[in-house]
Amino acid sequence: MLLVKALEESLKTELLKKWWGYSKEHGWIVLYWKAPSNRKKLVRIFVRCCDWETISVGIKDWGQPNFLYAPAYLRSIQDQSRGEAELNQLEKYREQAKLRLNEVGCKLITEEERRQMMLEAHKHFLQSRNIEYQGVRSTSKLHRVAYCWYCKGKLDSIINAECVACNWILCHCGACGCSYKVS
């Protein structure tokens, strides 16, 4: 119970940006308040954490029993080991959200804003690894679909730019092939 209490305090600091909850149908979900579509009154756009896809929910359907606030859901679990496993999973999703919510947010904002966010993330990613930024470009090759080696996000050459230095498709997290090492 102390862990749930600590989680609840931590979530309070995020409440103006994100609402974390659980759905029997979708599992762990997050409501990203910054998304323009979530300012409308009739529909909420949630992000399903298991695959980072967006789901639309009518405002009437948001709430109990369909959606539970994360601490309330964790308190409802009777089996302590299962509760700890769910809490650990939520913490992993919260950590991944730092990278992945940019991707989801990108789907909900203008194309230029999305491109700018990706460019900034790419510069930061390279800088954090002491790699010189050499620019990005629109992809010039045939349509390619892949997954990011760093965050496992989906990549698509039609949507994403590519790094000038390595020719890899950029990810929303900023990763490219410049610091990829085969393990």
Image: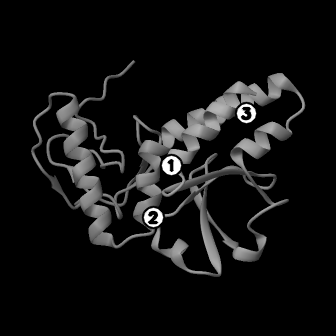
Location of the N terminus (image quadrant): top right
Crowding near the residue tagged with mark 2, few <14, some 14–19, many ≥20 C-alpha atoms within 10 Å = some
The alpha-carbon separation of the residues under discs 3 and 2 comes to 26 Å
Q: Which residue is label 1 attached to?
A: 14
The disc placed on residue 117 is: none
Crowding near the residue tagged with mark 3, few <14, some 14–19, many ≥20 C-alpha atoms within 10 Å = some
What is the three-letter code of the residue carrying label 3?
Glu
* Front residue of this view, candidates 34 and 54: 34
User: Is 130 located above or below residue 14 in the figure?
Assistant: above
Front disc: 3 or 2: 2
Q: Secondary structure at mark 1?
A: helix
On screen, residue 116 versus residue 1, left or right, reads left
Front disc: 2 or 1: 1
The disc placed on residue 86 is: 3
**Which of pointers 1 and 3 lies earlier in the amino acid sequence?**
1
* Front residue of this view, candidates 178 and 132: 132
What is the three-letter code of the residue carrying label 1?
Glu
User: Whole-percent x and y of residue 110?
Assistant: 34, 73
Q: Secondary structure at mark 3?
A: helix
Residue 74 position by quadrant: top right
What is the three-letter code of the residue carrying label 2?
Lys
Q: Secondary structure at mark 2?
A: loop
Residue 66 position by quadrant: bottom right
Residue located at (62% from left, 31% from top): 6
Work out which residue is located at the far right of the displayed protein and give it.
78
Q: Which residue is label 2 attached to?
A: 34
**Which of pointers 2 and 1 lies earlier in the amino acid sequence?**
1
Say whether marks 1 and 3 touch (CB < 8 Å): no
User: Whole-percent x and y of residue 159?
Assistant: 35, 63
